[in-house]
Image: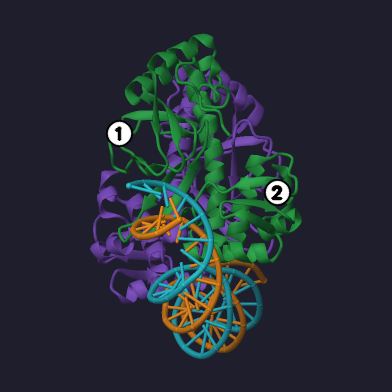
Chain colours: A green, B purple, C orange, D cyan
Amino acid sequence: MTVVFNERESCAACPIRHRAVCARCDTDELALLEAIKTYTTYSAGQAIIWRGDELVYCSSVVNGIAALSRTLEDGRTQMVGLLLPSDFIGRPGREHVDFDVTAVTDLTLCRFERRAFEKLIEQVPHISHRIMEMALDELNAAREWMVLLGRKTAREKIATFIEMIVRRDSVPLQTNSHHVLPLTREEIANLLGLTLETVSRQLSAMKRDGIISFSDRRSFSVTDFDALYRATGDDSDGGMIV
Amino acid sequence: MTVVFNERESCAACPIRHRAVCARCDTDELALLEAIKTYTTYSAGQAIIWRGDELVYCSSVVNGIAALSRTLEDGRTQMVGLLLPSDFIGRPGREHVDFDVTAVTDLTLCRFERRAFEKLIEQVPHISHRIMEMALDELNAAREWMVLLGRKTAREKIATFIEMIVRRDSVPLQTNSHHVLPLTREEIANLLGLTLETVSRQLSAMKRDGIISFSDRRSFSVTDFDALYRATGDDSDGGMIV
DNA sequence: CAGAGTTCTTGACTTGGATCAAGGATGCGC
DNA sequence: GCGCATCCTTGATCCAAGTCAAGAACTCTG
């Protein structure tokens, strides 16, 4: 299991030191961030902020998973992103929050008061440069997800999601290693733009087809990686290029 | 109509001077960009770059509209963004292009050789800071679009699209001002994750319902703005906050 | 380990949007 | 201003995924 980061440790020992907004900072710059940081923890399922709230803090995910989502008037909800360790929450320069943020698992955030953080960004180009890189990467990921939401079938969506989980856990890919679904069926549905029944049916179908097998409802392994990849509907060229 | 920017004019006279990647630059910094810029033009329908191509240039749209899109193996295509004047194309730090880029209308780009541009970014924090802002805004827009693609009905998608066009053209909003659809029915379909037949039917339905009226196939005005807004399916609170 | 609340699965039925098909409008080149 | 290509509209039919419903499998609490 993940070792929980001890809050008292310095930034130098932080598990996301080399991937988060601080990645490009040298020791002096890190000290400036360290001076204004605080940690907060949330337990699984807890709401963190709501759309429309005043944006008081910008944060990095230290460990755990959070979700960004939007709910329409009648209750339809769409997740627009999963936030993993090192991912950034908040938009420096904005007064209000644009999406609901929820803790999917138990979660630790490294938090900066927004105004102070904005001042720091002006002084420390390494921070804005890093946020630029991260935002451009996120933008790419969001656009890939738009293709999934707009054009893929339920089967392709599920296959893409499974493949994403597997790729995230283990490079290089190997058959039969064990993976955990971090989300409930309903959360998967909200991420993929489906209903929970369709998610359940497609997972059962992929099990029946010998592509994946479940040890319990949340744990699976891939039994036919080729078939999984073919089921994603992705263009075979481009997939390799990245 | 839009006045076409004369290439020979300096950056100081550029129509996107205060909105593009150079927006935060002072006169000296602008000179550095000016030294490496070149202009290129494309005519409507022309392909600019393809996914997988080597990323040689980063560019800003000076005038016209470009589209970012991705096509799956079997030909299904999804637009993942419209690029309007001042929008940025390319990802400094990446070797390859991630999405196809096409000129939707006649188009002028202000272009920088990628390597040189990356060096400049390291020297001039105002540029990376501006790209950070722009990328975070784009990310928000992409996420809003994900909600549309994942959860909205055909009618809501079309209403949201129309409302977007109208808002873009004219603030404040007024009934009966004239607007132009910059895209064909098929392009609208690819942007909204629909088929061209469904787009056509929904536009006809909105005409029948007295929400919009067409003077020709590409030009319309809004006859019932309230009904249009209600048809978007958007949450009434949040919509106002932004 | 009993009972209550989740979460998940599966079946039966419905439906919104896709697909297939035909014809009309518009624009462009010669 | 005729011929051809593109773009758009409308109708008929189909099907993937949504909805509604019931019950099974977990899991948490006392």
The quarter of the picture where the C terminus of chain A appears is top right
Q: Secondary structure at mark 1?
A: loop
Cα separation, mark 2 vs mark 1, equals 38 Å
Q: Secondary structure at mark 2?
A: helix
Badges 2 and 1, same chain: yes
Query: Dividing the picture into quarters, in which one does residue B12 lie?
Result: top left
| Left or right: residue B169 compared with residue A68 | left
Amino acid bearing label 2: Gly
Q: Chain of mark 2?
A: A
Q: Does B228 sit above or below residue A176?
A: below
Amino acid bearing label 1: Glu
Q: In the rendered image, which residue does mark 1 sit on?
A: A95
Q: Position of residue B19 (x, y in %)?
A: 42, 34
A196 or D23: nearer the viewer? D23
Q: Position of residue A238 (x, y in %)?
A: 70, 49
Q: Residue at x 59, y 38 (%)?
A: B90
Q: Does A35 sit above or below residue B39?
A: above
Q: Residue at x 74, y 56 (%)?
A: A224
Q: Position of residue B8 (x, y in %)?
A: 53, 33
Q: Residue at x 37, y 64 (%)?
A: B156
Give the class, few, some or many, for how many residues have Cα within 10 Å of label 1's Cα (few <14, many ≥20): some
A84 or B86: nearer the viewer? A84
Q: Which mark is residue A238?
A: 2
Q: Can see residue B171?
A: no
Q: How many marks?
A: 2
B183 or A111: nearer the viewer? A111
